[in-house]
Image: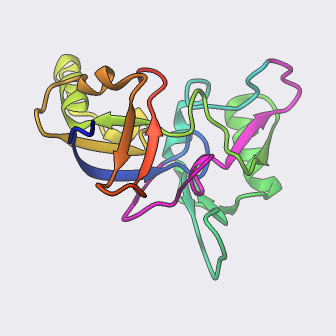
Amino acid sequence: MRVKLGEVEALFRYPVKSMCGENLDLAELGWHGIEGDRRLAFRRVGDRCGFPWLTASKLPELILHVPLRLGSTDGELPTHIRTPDGEEMAVFSQELATQISNRHGSSVAMMHLNRGIFDVASISVISCATVNEVGKLAGQQPDVRRFRPNILIKTLRSIPFEEDDRVEGVLSFGEDASAASVTVTERD
């Protein structure tokens, strides 16, 4: 039985893992998440752990880097990155890799993975009520992109953490049988 949870308030994607996200008016949802989401990431060269990706937990200023599409581009991938200093560098340039390596303190290389580079799941959903409650508990209003969601939902009941009750359920984005749907596998 379908129950209306709310409305989609915003859509986001993060073309480069741990870098600034972008708002979307619409998104193509496929087997590997939202098209163009987290398809690029810096790999820590020589790191043999199971998760070699450089993330904002290791280099917080990554979130200040902005992926850009300059010139004529085909597809969803950015062509350049704007650094916190305002410089624009080609995504796969040695100049960008060197700058990030220097900031991180060890060598990194940009990687492209068609299926994306996700920590847990290829889609992340959070409600406005949850973001507001976390902000209230923290004593500040956080930028929702800090939670790295793909889909922000304005729920009908505005109950914080209501989306946690949907674990093992299915969220459908639309009312007909062909609506995009995702299975909720765990809490965000």
Q: Which of 24 and 90 is in front in this view?
A: 24
Left or right of residue 16, residue 99 in this image: right
- Which corner quadrant of the image does residue 169 belong to? top left
What residue sits 29% from the left and 21% below the top? 165
Query: Residue 120: horizontal and vertical position, in percent?
Result: 58, 27
Q: Does the magenta stretch include residue 138?
A: no
Quadrant, the C terminus: top left
- Vertical placement of 88 versus 167: above or below? below
Q: Coloured how?
A: rainbow
What residue sits 89% from the left and 26% below the top? 46
Left or right of residue 115, residue 57 in this image: left
Q: Is residue 33 magenta?
A: yes
Count of numbered labels shown in the rendering: 0
What residue sits 69% from the left and 31% below the top? 104
What residue sits 65% from the left and 77% below the top? 73
First to last magenta residue range: 21-49
Left or right of residue 5, residue 10 in this image: right
Left or right of residue 48, residue 120 in this image: left
Residue located farthest toward the bottom when viewing the structure as drawn: 72
Query: Residue 24: horizontal and vertical position, in percent?
Result: 40, 61
- Vertical placement of 166 versus 83: above or below? above
Query: Residue 18: horizontal and vertical position, in percent?
Result: 56, 39
Query: Residue 47: horizontal and vertical position, in percent?
Result: 84, 23
Q: Which of 38 and 171 is in front in this view?
A: 171
Q: Nearer the viewer, residue 16 or 116?
A: 116
Quadrant, the N terminus: top left
- Which corner quadrant of the image does residue 179 belong to? bottom left
Residue located farthest toward the front when viewing the structure as drawn: 1
